Image: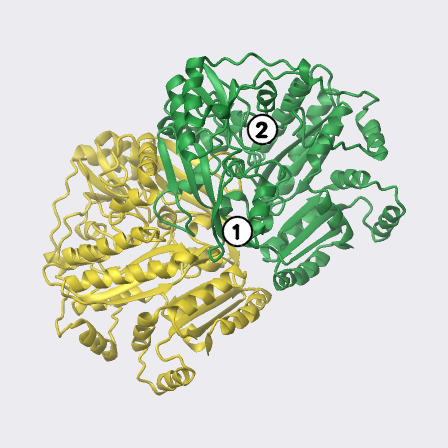
Chain colours: A yellow, B green
Amino acid sequence: MKWWGWGDPSRNVELPQQVLDLLGSELGTGDRRARPVALEEVRVPDPRLSERQLGPLRDAVGPEWVDEDRLARITHAAGKGYPDLVRLRAGSAESAPDAIVYPGGEEEVRSVLDACASAGIAVVPFGGGTSVVGGVEPLRDSLGGVISLDLGRMTRVSDVDDRSLTALLGPGLRGPQVESELGRHGLTLGHFPQSFEYATVGGWVATRSAGQASTGYGNIEKLVAGLRVITPTGGIDLPPMPATAAGPGLRQLLVGSEGVLGVITQAALKLRRKPAERHYEAWMFHDFEEGVEAFRALEQGDIAPDVARLSDESETRLSLALAGEGSRARRLGRRYMELRGYREGCVAILGFEGEQAQVRRRRAPAERALKRGGGLSLGTSPGRAWERDRYAGPYLRDALLDHGVMPETLETAHQWSSLMSLYRAVREAIEAALATRGTPGLVMCHVSHLYPNGASLYFTFLARQQEGQELEQWHAVKAAATDAIVEAGGTITHHHAVGRDHAAWLPREVGAVGVDVIRSLKAKLDPAGILNPGKLVPGGNG
Amino acid sequence: MKWWGWGDPSRNVELPQQVLDLLGSELGTGDRRARPVALEEVRVPDPRLSERQLGPLRDAVGPEWVDEDRLARITHAAGKGYPDLVRLRAGSAESAPDAIVYPGGEEEVRSVLDACASAGIAVVPFGGGTSVVGGVEPLRDSLGGVISLDLGRMTRVSDVDDRSLTALLGPGLRGPQVESELGRHGLTLGHFPQSFEYATVGGWVATRSAGQASTGYGNIEKLVAGLRVITPTGGIDLPPMPATAAGPGLRQLLVGSEGVLGVITQAALKLRRKPAERHYEAWMFHDFEEGVEAFRALEQGDIAPDVARLSDESETRLSLALAGEGSRARRLGRRYMELRGYREGCVAILGFEGEQAQVRRRRAPAERALKRGGGLSLGTSPGRAWERDRYAGPYLRDALLDHGVMPETLETAHQWSSLMSLYRAVREAIEAALATRGTPGLVMCHVSHLYPNGASLYFTFLARQQEGQELEQWHAVKAAATDAIVEAGGTITHHHAVGRDHAAWLPREVGAVGVDVIRSLKAKLDPAGILNPGKLVPGGNG
């Protein structure tokens, strides 16, 4: 992974001229090229752990698994959020951990926590490092040191139970590893977030991750059947179970604990048989609200596809530009839509997966419902194109940054009856905040996770970077958007988690007593306050 | 409700002669008739609250809503578990609360908790009083008094949102009230536990209730979109939301909190449209395991009915006896099954509900799968008969007690791959424990809640009561069964909750650290330890 961005450094994504033109005319971006500094120019503080502090860590995991290497410390200095990338590209890795520790198993995790609790060293659990909310940034709070606890060695897959459709998965398994290991048993987890190539099982569970197919397969919280967590106070082992009424839901309490309560050392996850059929198709709606209503009908009628995405007008426009609308086929397609009255329409992607019969049972009634709801079928080829590019978003972000564009995303969810007012409020808040900074933006949105009672909204916005004030600019827009979300009654995050960036708004989400509950759990499980300080709850966890 | 048993006192259920014969031959019951004592013989301690203690309670809710009446205290002295009924029928209401307090709203709940925290009075939240695990028994722990906080006045239904399919429901609403209020909007909650006629929304949420149609509609934990809870430390308001990644799952933490962390004052529950079609039918399998495998295929193939029940051989035999197998139609039916090789078979009840199309989409493929799995269709009439009698169980229990028979139920759940071994282990443990007491039993079981990764097992057992040692006899069997459940890796309770009866086994379910987590939450939210002492966690909550 690039230290300053996303993915394989050798994979370069270029923006089509049409997109550059669009950004130029709408955002006022010029010819500026903004490249990251060279690696050797990155500022990294010297590691601060003494030999006396390093000794017990080396004893815990073996000396070869305690790493003070400069590049490793830079790659563990931040996640992949916009402010992280801004700082890294500018050469700031001031938040680098003092060391990276790679435990090989649960007992080693326990020993590392013991050593850190004794020595007063902060521990930041690190999976794929893909957090976009500052969840893995090493903050030392008032502690004397900070390590990244990289779980990349804990990739064991065991107890694959093809009758119960569950397996025990190590926290360090990345998306492709999960699918390849399970695929050998004819199974799938069906969890495909945009960060799939790098993100890990432990990270998914710790952040309540959702994937592109979660409308069908369910968010990770729905896929967790059991968990093993090591806390500084001791281990919690909740075996896989279909359901239980034995008191408060401790599994769900640990899902979303963001590394502040304990380290997830194993997840028992629910699986499905690998789909025999995968049918991806696209539809067009006259406007966003019409598409939202059609999606609601599918979901509440029990015929929703596994992947269900609906772009608003602006996102549709940019997607078409990205796909290179100049081609003859595209122009014909555009003409076809216009003739049918879908001039400034909204594109939806639907993906049905499963046994042939399962796909058929939903697809035929879904097609009727979509037509009734005002939809126009665009066939399977745009669906397949979406599928091919489904993990491309973060690569594009790097390309945009290279052109001096701020590309940021944020997401929320709400009940169906409040979804459109939430959409308008957030959109307007982002637009107004960007305009106030003198950098008018392009704000886009899609619906991507359907539930019987509501859906998620995922916003992407682009604006010209304010050179030298990139972080202030970002913060102003982020705060305005999150305030608007809270005001409109949406959740501050549907699947990116709280991390550093949303912590200030947590009291608005769960109330003062709710925050106190989390703090008291933290005090119980992590009395020395070493686990991921500065995340999840505002003003420290101590 | 009868003070000594279940339901309307005027509704008498008589056991058919065939059942009495079966009990006589298999359990050695004779002609003994064991009637409850007369109401005036019931022993109730004098109420112990001083005028100084009663004053703030009367101020909180109004004097007419603080009740020290003898009958009210008897009806709030216990739930409806077997040991509760044994004691009540024998005239013991020693655990009666000192008073019953009926709050009219959230602010009154808050004032009552404040008054009780100041005065050191235990508070037992009381919904329908149908707990079968001792969940509503007033225990005063070391406190000076105990009240039942009867939520029966808090029956408000508001914000019925027919686009998001949710509504806000007061905790005191009973099953029939819920369905009649929602029915006026064309909606249903779809929650039909056997205790439906009396149990309440607050009780369902506090105990992680499951209903007979929960395979389709989902357990209450799946239906909770939001919650309002008043704790002695303050209120927690979690509005209805389709999903959120904002930290640990506080909604699920409060679901199943059994009145020890706070008082549920409102639940935002997910609804469905009232089904246009309801199709109930019965099937026969050669044996239990064959039926279990057929059910697994339905569930994992996404074609499971909303109601799915499979009785084992013994339960099938007793059900047929209860239905009065003597009739000509029954004898012909039995002959029909035998001719097809289903001599000692297992009956399954399947109920499909929804729009006509939704029912059809599942029923046709389900029928094929059931036939492939060894099933024989018995048509719709036994399905309709089951539906007619779906709430009859607790009435039968009273009739059995009248004949000196101990009727008890317990339940668990496990992964599909362990379900049959759990079944055999628990069955054998109950049989052995009963045999050891010299009262050989009739042990029956059914599967009634299906999940992709497993299912529930619901055991019913009958045995001759050991006169004068009813509670010791019960406790010996209960302990043996629960030990066997834990040993086989099942959950100690799938939907009856922990209460008083399962508390000793909670550490086996969630571990020492898990219990500590609940205790520390309790200490945070209820520092005076007034809420439902002696429940959920072993050895008090203080």
* Distance (Cα) linking label 2 and label 1: 28 Å
Q: Quarter of the image holding residue B465?
A: top right
Residue under the point 37% across and 47% down: A202
Between A65 and A124, the residue placed more toward the observer is: A124
Between A43 and B104, the residue placed more toward the observer is: B104
Dot 2, how many residues are within 10 Å of its Cα: few (below 14), some (14-19), or many (20+)? many
- Percent x, y of residue A168: 46, 46
Residue under the point 70% across and 61% down: B368
Going from the N terminus, do you reach mark 2 or mark 1 first? 2
Residue named by callout 1: B271
Q: Quarter of the image holding residue A283?
A: bottom left
Question: The C terminus of chain B lies in which quarter of the figure?
Answer: top left
Residue under the point 30% across and 54% down: A485
Furthest toward the right, the residue is: B328
- Residue contact at pointers 2 and 1, CB within 8 angstroms: no
Residue B529 appears in the rendering: no
Q: Which mark is residue B133?
A: 2
B349 sits to left or right of A3: right
Between B124 and B257, the residue placed more toward the observer is: B124
- Name the subunit of mark 1: B
Q: Quarter of the image holding residue A287?
A: bottom left
- Percent x, y of residue B211: 60, 43
> Of helix, strand and loop, which one carries label 2?
loop
Dot 1, how many residues are within 10 Å of its Cα: few (below 14), some (14-19), or many (20+)? many
- Percent x, y of residue B421: 64, 39
Is the residue B482 above or below the residue A335 in the image? above
Between B389 and B349, the residue placed more toward the observer is: B389
Which mark is in front, 2 or 1?
1
A386 sits to left or right of B475: left
- Percent x, y of residue B296: 62, 51
On the same chain, marks 2 and 1? The answer is yes
- Name the subunit of mark 2: B
